[in-house]
């Protein structure tokens, strides 16, 4: 083993022993970083997976938290910043994506709670209708920042003022983690339970 190879191996061992590893998961050509920084907080990748619709791959999703969670209840109860990251694998009409989100919210939110979410849903729908289309490789994130609210960032640009209520962020998370998720296998992957 050359001197340089020994140095690299030694550094890799040191990084792993100190728990400082930074990794990248790759799904369908999309690199999902681990960890990420959100508003000055380092968040670890809790899980990542692919959203399928019939046989088609639609997007790669990643869930980031400040501590590991393996159930939806643990995710909702986790304090601190949270992020869901979506990277498209195919072209999607942004208006249609907004409608699918609304349907996912309706499927996973008690009826009495839906009425409170309507103003935020209208704003969210506007964010996606303003985009027209999302292309393969384009990304958007939905971040919960305590003290600020939910920040939606599309193609690297924050979209308007934060949504203040944690209930709205949790309602969005239930699209993927609720009792009737968009994709059951993706739910398990985001919770780190994929086989």
Image: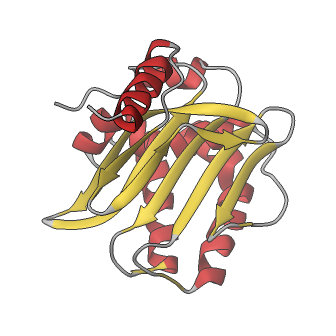
Which residue sits at x=22%, y=41%? Answer: 185
| Residue 62: percent from left, percent from top | 44, 45
The quadrant in which residue 123 appears is: bottom right
* Left or right: 80 in relation to 195: right
Residue 123 visible at all: yes
Which residue sits at x=67%, y=41%? Answer: 37
Check the image and name the residue furthest to the front: 3
| Residue 146: percent from left, percent from top | 79, 32
Check the image and name the residue furthest to the bottom: 132
Which residue sits at x=65%, y=59%? Answer: 121
> Vertical placement of 75 versus 27: above or below?
above
* Left or right: 37 in relation to 68: right
Check the image and name the residue furthest to the left: 55
Which residue sits at x=44%, y=25%? Answer: 72
| Residue 159: percent from left, percent from top | 75, 67
Residue 182 visible at all: no
């Amino acid at each position: 083993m050359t001197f340089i190879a020994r140095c690299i191996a030694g550094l890799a061992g040191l990084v792993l022993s100190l728990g400082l590893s930074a990794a990248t998961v790759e799904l369908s050509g999309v690199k999902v970083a681990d960890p990420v920084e959100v508003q000055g907080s380092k968040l670890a990748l809790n899980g990542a997976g692919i959203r399928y619709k019939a046989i088609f791959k639609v997007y790669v999703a990643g869930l980031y938290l400040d501590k590991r969670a393996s159930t939806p209840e643990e995710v909702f109860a986790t304090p601190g910043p949270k992020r869901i990251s979506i990277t498209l694998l195919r072209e999607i009409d942004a208006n249609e994506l907004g409608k699918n989100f609304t349907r996912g919210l309706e499927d996973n939110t008690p009826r009495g709670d839906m009425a409170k979410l309507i103003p935020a849903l209208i704003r969210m729908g506007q964010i996606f209708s303003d985009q027209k289309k999302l292309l393969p490789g384009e990304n958007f994130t939905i971040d919960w920042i305590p003290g600020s609210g939910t920040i939606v960032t599309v193609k690297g640009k924050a979209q308007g003022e934060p949504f203040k209520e944690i209930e709205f962020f949790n309602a969005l998370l239930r699209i993927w983690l609720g009792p009737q998720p968009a994709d059951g296998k993706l739910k398990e992957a985001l919770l780190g339970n994929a086989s």
